[in-house]
């Protein structure tokens, strides 16, 4: 028997340590939370994706009374990017959330498994790492790739 260990590098930064481009992306993700439709969970998530054609696409969670029919912010941004700019490659995604009290979450939230898988598809399509910025009120986590958020991804087998 042998053990293997997987390590995920996470950069923990303050908002004011971000580059101008990353700061703008985070602001857009935060803004997008105000366009979320979350009458059931009251948890508002926003995502902003920077593309290699210079465009930024945003998305927010859109719920439905038939709960599984709703979509997370990350996938709404991800699929919108594919529908609007099919040839553009993803560079970075920023994700923000406001809790049921309406305030931005203190600690960063991470995309659900389904969103990680959908984002990974776009990382593979891009042919390079897509950075992931998870935002809390003060501290942010920067991950170097979608792949790093999804060890043992389906595509590996
Ligand atoms: N949600 C997202 O939009 N992204 C995530 O990464 C996790 C959860 C949404 C789904 C649902 O509308 C609400 O947050 C509560 O789970």
Image (spheres, rainbow, N blue to C red):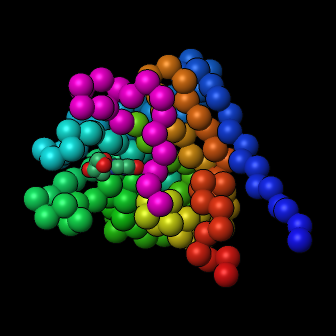
Q: Is residue 150 visible?
A: yes
Q: Residue at x 61, y 38 (%)?
A: 142
Left or right of 135 on screen, residue 64: left
Place residue 29 in its image quadrant.
Answer: top left
Place residue 98 in its image quadrant.
Answer: top left
Q: Residue at x 14, y 58 (%)?
A: 64
Estimate the x, y position of residue 83 in percent, counting from the top left: 34, 68
Q: Is residue 28 visible?
A: no
Nearer the observer, 121 or 21: 121
**What range of the chain is rendered magenta?**
97-113
Left or right of 21 on screen, residue 4: right
Left or right of 127 on screen, residue 32: left
Main SS, magenta region, reads loop
Estimate the x, y position of residue 57 in percent, counting from the top left: 38, 50
The quarter of the image holding the C terminus is: bottom right
Nearer the observer, 31 or 51: 31
Q: Residue furthest front?
A: 1
Q: Residue at x 32, y 42 (%)?
A: 45
Nearer the observer, 81 or 78: 78
Q: Residue at x 68, y 39 (%)?
A: 10
The quarter of the image holding the N terminus is: bottom right
Q: Residue furthest bottom?
A: 157
Above or below residue 45? Residue 64 is below
Residue 48 counted in the magenta span: no
Estimate the x, y position of residue 76 in percent, counting from the top left: 32, 58
Estimate the x, y position of residue 139 in percent, counting from the top left: 54, 24
Q: Residue furthest right?
A: 2
Left or right of 95 on screen, residue 4: right
């Amino acid at each position: 028997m042998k053990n293997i260990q997987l390590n995920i590098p996470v950069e923990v930064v303050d908002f004011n340590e971000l580059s101008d481009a990353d700061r703008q992306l985070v602001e857009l993700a935060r803004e997008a939370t105000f366009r979320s439709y979350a009458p059931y969970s009251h948890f508002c998530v926003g995502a902003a994706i920077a593309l290699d054609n210079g465009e930024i696409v945003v998305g927010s969670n859109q719920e439905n009374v038939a709960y599984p029919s709703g979509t997370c912010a990350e996938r709404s941004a991800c699929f919108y990017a594919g529908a609007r700019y099919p040839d553009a490659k993803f560079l970075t995604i920023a994700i923000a959330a406001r809790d049921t009290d309406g305030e931005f979450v203190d600690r960063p939230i991470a995309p659900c498994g389904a969103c990680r898988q959908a984002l990974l598809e776009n990382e593979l399509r891009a042919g390079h790492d897509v950075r992931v910025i998870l935002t809390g009120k003060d501290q942010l986590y920067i991950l170097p790739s979608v792949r790093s958020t999804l060890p043992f991804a389906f595509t590996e087998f």
